[in-house]
């Protein structure tokens, strides 16, 4: 295997490892994320009711 091939393989393995770590953290934080989405939705609705952004 060429040097470039080894480097590519190593970086792919590192990236897939990172994805696994991010996924597990994402599952731990799922409730927090859910709450944040609800808050954002409330803010969006408030802005729309105030007519911000030129929407009538």
Image (cartoon, rainbow, N blue to C red):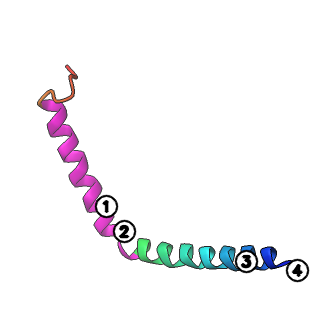
Residue 35: x, y in percent? Answer: 25, 61
Quarter of image, res 49: top left
- 53 or 45: nearer the eye? 53
Q: Name the disc covering residue 30, or none.
A: 2
Q: Name the disc covering residue 1, or none.
A: 4
Q: CA distance from mark 2 to mark 1?
A: 6 Å
Q: Secondary structure at mark 4?
A: loop
Please report whichever mark, 1 or 3, sits nearer to the chain's N-terminal start.
3
Q: For the residues labelled 2 and 1, say whether their Cβ atoms are less than 8 Å apart.
A: yes
Q: Name the disc covering residue 34, or none.
A: 1
Within 10 angstroms of label 2, few (less than 14), some, or many (20 or more) residues?
A: few
Within 10 angstroms of label 1, few (less than 14), some, or many (20 or more) residues?
A: few
Please name which of the two marks, 2 or 3, marks the residue nearer to the observer.
Answer: 3
| Residue beneath the point at 16% across and 30% down | 52
Q: CA distance from mark 1 to mark 3?
A: 38 Å
The residue most toward the right is 1
Q: For the residues labelled 3 and 4, say whether their Cβ atoms are less than 8 Å apart.
A: no
Q: For the residues labelled 2 and 4, say whether their Cβ atoms are less than 8 Å apart.
A: no
- Helix, strand or loop for the magenta stretch, by majority: helix
Q: CA distance from mark 3 to mark 4?
A: 10 Å
Residue 8: x, y in percent? Answer: 73, 73
Which stretch appears magenta? 28-49
Residue 51: x, y in percent? Answer: 15, 27
Within 10 angstroms of label 3, few (less than 14), some, or many (20 or more) residues?
A: few
| Residue beneath the point at 60% across and 73% down | 15
Q: CA distance from mark 4 to mark 1?
A: 46 Å
Q: Secondary structure at mark 2?
A: helix
């Amino acid at each position: 295997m060429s040097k470039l091939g080894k480097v590519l393989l190593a970086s792919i393995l590192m990236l897939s490892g990172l994805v696994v770590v991010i996924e597990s953290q994402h599952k731990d934080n799922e409730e927090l994320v859910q709450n944040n989405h609800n808050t954002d939705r409330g803010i969006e609705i408030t802005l729309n009711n105030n007519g911000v952004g030129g929407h009538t």
